[in-house]
Image (spheres, rainbow, N blue to C red):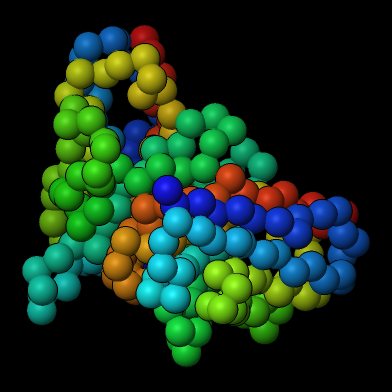
Amino acid sequence: EVQLLESGGALVQPGGSLRLSCAASGFTFSSNDMTWVRQAPGKALEWVSSINHNGANTFYVDSVKGRFTISRDNSKNTLYLQMNSLRPEDTAVYFCAKHVAGINSATNDWGQGTRVTVS
Amino acid sequence: DIVMTQSPDSLAVSLGERATINCKSSQSVLLSSNNKNYLAWYQQKSGQPPRLLIYWASTRQSGVPDRFSGSGSGTDFTLTISSLQAEDVAVYYCQQGYSNPYTFGQGTKLEIK
């Protein structure tokens, strides 16, 4: 059974930093492209960042470019999102998700999310 | 950026009736080299993460009931629930995977009439 477990969410002041983690199990993590999606309170889903299976290619939404860094450690089956210079508008539940195939494909497994509050 | 626009924003349908949700992209999400539409549909129930229903516009994800179907190509897509069940109450999102950023629609809230 695929499991994705996010952690690292917290209350942080504007300008602060957080590192989110997503521990993966139940599949061959090193073979799968991964993504972070966020959802602000009462709002729609927003794609944030994606990384290919070996970490060589990364993609970001414009609003987080230069502030967030996606990475992965395939030896630890873990996905990360380093979040710097946090803003109130980054307040959201952050989900990690696994792709069906490549980054352009849909995401068929999601974690429960971790809450980030910037205030 | 590709803008995804869903309609309607909310929908109330009687149990057993058909529900139809539309999604329009600001540019085509059909890749001609493989004839795939990079369009997915997700269901999100209250307090839960999204669940993949449909990918490549019309391929049902494993385990999804066959009352859910997806159709469309290019810029216009539809999610149809053929016979609404109580457990289908949720917000439904479309998402394009054609080009970065991989944008979602604003969501359609589906309720029971």
Q: Residue at x 50, y 84 (%)?
A: A55
Q: Is residue A66 visible?
A: yes
Image quadrant in which you'd find residue B42? top left
Image quarter (top left, top right, bottom left or bottom right) of the C terminus of chain A: bottom right
- Above or below: residue B95 compared with residue B11: below
Compared across the picture, whether A58 is left or right of A102 comes to right
Q: Residue at x 87, y 59 (%)?
A: A12
Frontmost residue, B38 versus A32: A32
Compared across the picture, whether B6 is left or right of B73 comes to right
Q: Position of residue B21 (x, y in %)?
A: 28, 35
Q: Is residue A63 visible?
A: no
- Above or below: residue B88 compared with residue A67: above
Q: Residue furthest bottom?
A: A56
Compared across the picture, whether B75 is left or right of A49 comes to left
Frontmost residue, B99 versus A25: A25
Frontmost residue, A69 versus B93: A69
